[in-house]
Amino acid sequence: MKSVYLVFSVVFSLLLFSGNTWAQKPMAPEKLQGTIRVDAEAVVDLMVNTPNLVIIDTRKDIEFGKGHIQGAISMLDTKMTIEGLKKHVPEKSTPILLYCNGERCLRSSRAASFALDAGYKLIYWFRGGWNEWIKKGMPISNETD
Amino acid sequence: MRLTNLKISNISIKTLTVTILILIAFASVLVSVASGKYFFKTAQEAQLYSLNRVIQVSTKEIMQELHDQVYSIATALSSKGVIFSEYKKRTRTDDNEKLIIALNDPFVTGFVGAYSVELIKIRAYDLDLNFVAESDKGIKGMPQKLPSSLYQMAQNRRGSERTKALYSLWQYANQSHYSVLVPLGGVFVTGYLEVVVDPVTNLVKLAEKMDSPVSIKSGMDENIIYYLPDKSVKNLLPVNYILETGMGEPAYQLTSYEDIEKLSEGVEKTVFNSITMFVGLVLIILIISAWLFQLFLFKPLGLMLNQIKIISDGDLSRELKVDGLSEIDSLTVEFNKMINEVRSREEELKKLSIIDELTKIYNRRKFDEVLKSEYFSACRTKLPLAVLMVDIDYFKNYNDTYGHPEGDKCLKKVAAAIMNSVSRSSDLVARYGGEEFVVVLPDISESGSQAVARKIITNIAELQIAHSASKVSDIITVSIGGFTSVPSVDHNPDFIVSEADKSLYQSKSEGRNKFTVRSEVNS
């Protein structure tokens, strides 16, 4: 009988442990010091009202190719360099908007930190990312140029 | 059986018990069958409810997939390519011809995802939701305006809200369509594009999802059939779901046909097993009950009844012998007590019937009985038999002089004295009547009889009971007449009595207070 309890408790602990592992799947931080957090509606307003806004999609190329926010440029966070940024955004005062897949994705927060360190002053962070964009039925662009 | 014969006393405990047991068995079968049916019905209702949920969820899934596909197509068409550029040009030139060609393009050259949706119209609207143009291709005759459900949602939207895609199931003339409205020009809205599809093509997938035959009919008119199963749905249970438009009107009646027999199979098996087990258990309990009743009630009762019948028929010597439960045992004990009581009372009664109440010696009845028996016994053995008749002298005068109570006392004393005068167990002393006593002396000689007679006279004289009214003495005396003979079958017991009586008469006539014993030889 004791062995049954032992097996049961081991299985239960494993389940509990694995449950915690799922729960601990990385979440993007709620706030990112030095950036302005925005939602999908605010992104549209920014796009309409801020002509020099540079939108950077930090997802993989293949994801970008399937659809992205209108006018965005693709730049994977891991391949982000000061030179690369400078090429697209020469002025440090130019507003930049960064997004990736969503709250379970850390790419945009990493890229935002990178841009902050690079000296860019106005950084908008769209934490909800592509998932929120799609969920809210916002326009999708397939333009590659 | 006629109703008049139906008395409680006609029904045995066994019949009643067996009837009750049969009724219990019958009731248990009825209850289990009824509860089985109820269980079956409940299980079916639960299954039906689950199936309703399944068809609802499956339909919603299909509509979500359809939405994703149409949304994807609509955004693709609106954000780039000829439609948007022709729409932009048109705002400058007020010429719809090229726009219509652009709107026809997806019908002609195809588009990504064309295989998964049934495109029926593409239409363009301006910023104020006014109709601009529509494709020539696709179905004809659609009213040239934004469907009201979409219009209600789209009007009065401001800012970023205007860029969001809208979608709705809508209908006109009993025909239902699914539309997605997306902004033309993306975030920089300049107008709207509506992509209209026929959802039936996608709803047909319900059959695959439900893994059962499916029919699709108009929600408004059952006679408008969009899709029917390719095989017979006879004997199948229809499970319905109404898919509504954005305005809450019934758009489609979706029916999935479920094999109820297949669904019921498990339930039926469970119900059958439960009923069989329950009824079996009840029957086993009833059979055991019947056996216990037979062993501990019917059998002892039957034995008891048989024995009581024998006893009540007159055999009081028997006792009830029945082993059984405490009540049966008590009944047996109490019955035996009663039988003992009856037996002792009967003996007493018997005794009372042969004893003289006053003198406590045998009475005339016992005398007759014994005389008869001794007489015929003597006939066989050829042994002599003597009878002595004893009469108190002038007893009437004694009663007159001393009163009846004293007379009674006198009779008692005389009786006791006569009793003391015989010594053998076979000798019998009885009161013959009034002041007359009789003595039967079997197997005795004439001289023996005379000796007894003499002893009687002596014993009575010794009593010294004063009798002033006697004419022969001043005390109580008796006259005795006896007769001794070897009885013969030629005579009867009365003969010997009458001969003794003659001797008594002789004693009396010879002056009383004496005995005369004659024998057959000298008579």
Image (cartoon, coloured by chain):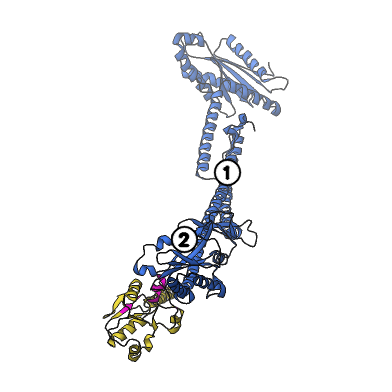
Give yes or no for residue A143 being in the magenta stretch. yes
Above or below, B226 against B116 in this view is above
Q: Which residue is mark 1?
A: B23
Which percent across, then down, holds residue A102? 38, 76
Chain at numbered mark 2: B
B498, above or below A139, in the image? above
- Residue in view at x 45 percent, y 57 percent: B247
Closer to the camera in the image, B252 or B163:
B163
- Amino acid at circle 1: Leu
Of pointers 2 and 1, the one earlier in the residue sequence = 1
Asked where in the image residue B116 lies, by quadrant, the reply is bottom right
Depth check: give the residue in front, B156 or A4: B156
Q: Check the picture and name the quadrant holding the C terminus of chain A.
A: bottom left
Q: Position of residue A142 (x, y in %)?
A: 45, 78
Q: Left of B487 or right of it: where is A123?
A: left
Secondary structure of the residue carrying numbered label 1: helix
Residue B499 in the image: above or below residue A132: above
Mark 1, Cα crowd under 10 Å, few <14 / some 14-19 / many 20+, is few
Q: Which residue is mark 2?
A: B147
**Residues at circles 2 and 1 in contact by the CB criterion of under 8 Å:** no
Task: Specify the chain shown as yellow.
Answer: A
Numbered mark located on residue B461 in the image: none
Q: Can you give x and y, in whole percent of width and height, for residue B307 in the image? A: 60, 38
- The magenta stretch is A124-145
- Residue ranking furthest to the right: B490
For the N terminus of chain A, which image quadrant? Answer: bottom left
Subunit under mark 1: B
**Chain B: colour as depicted:** blue
| Residue B194 located within the stretch drawn in magenta | no
